[in-house]
Amino acid sequence: MSAAVVGELQGVGVILGRQEVLKGLDLTLSAGEFVALLGSNGSGKTTLVRALLGLLPVASGEVRLFGTPLERFRDWRRIGYVPQRFGATSGVPATVEEVVLTGRIAVARRMRGFSAGDRQAALQALELMGLARVSRRRVSQLSGGQQQRVLIARALVNEPDFLLLDEPVSSVDPENQKMFAQALERLSELNATVLLVAHALGAMEPLVHRTVVLDRGTVVYDGVPRAEHEDEHAHHHPRVMHAGGLPKER
């Protein structure tokens, strides 16, 4: 029996300004998959993630989440998202705990504030990311790497069914990358789907089931992870691959 489809793009095109960033792109993500999305800078990785979340309009094609067309999807508590940059938290006059609690808004009881259960979930997410001891500090007082870990904790607070991560550990030290990988392993054990945008997988490499490589807005490889993909994109000089694993003429 095939796994349920969690995220799907069919013939999706996205135009930013006058540039066609995604071009008739097809991608299906199934329950329980851990997918690494690779590609050189400007290949369309972040645009793909933002299109999946409805943060960018699509010029053509269709996006579906859990089988529902994106424009009708409402069950956002099932989605976790870590953006590429941590500017969303820097300068915010809020504590670490308060920022993580915002991830519980979709499940918190309306007009009654956050419950003890919400606060316990926030504390557990902070513990996973090694931030419990700074839960009362202002986010603006943290280092860039710590701020990024706050965003990761916020995304994990609901144990989402679908987690989208746009280069989440680019400013996180190796030890905390291992901690993050352990948190993702827990989600995988719960049959969550993970889409990870990365240049280098690092501690996440053992978790990856499938690699998707983008080049100029199209999928040029979709299959089992290959070490050469990570090596190429980690150095920002990709040799584009097709599904057979051989170099593609450019």
Image (tube, rainbow, N blue to C red):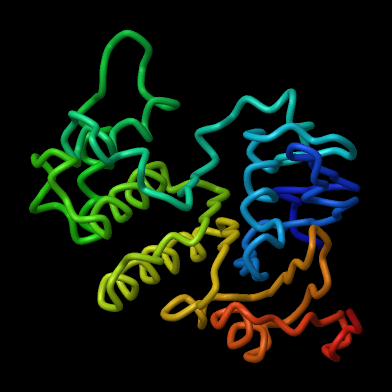
User: In the rendering, at what x and y percent does residue 146 appear?
Assistant: 23, 56
Looking at the picture, tell me which residue is in the foreground, 230 or 183.
230
Tally the numbered discs. 0
Tell me: residue 29, above or below residue 103: below
Looking at the picture, tell me which residue is in the foreground, 66 or 212.
212
Q: Quadrant of residue 114?
A: top left
Quarter the N terminus occupies: bottom right
Quarter the C terminus occupies: bottom right
Residue at the extreme front of the image, as rendered = 18
- Which residue occupies 27% across, 70% down? 176
User: In the rendering, at what x and y percent does residue 154 appear?
Assistant: 35, 43
- Which residue occupies 85% across, 91% down? 246
- On the picture, is 47 further left or further right than 18? left
Looking at the picture, tell me which residue is in the foreground, 33 or 54.
54
User: In the rendering, at what x and y percent does residue 224 appear?
Assistant: 72, 82
- On the picture, is 232 further left or further right than 143? right
User: In the rendering, at what x and y percent does residue 208 appear?
Assistant: 58, 75
Residue at the extreme top of the image, as rendered = 111
- Which residue occupies 41% across, 79% down? 203
- On the picture, is 54 further left or further right than 234? right
- Which residue occupies 56% across, 63% down? 196
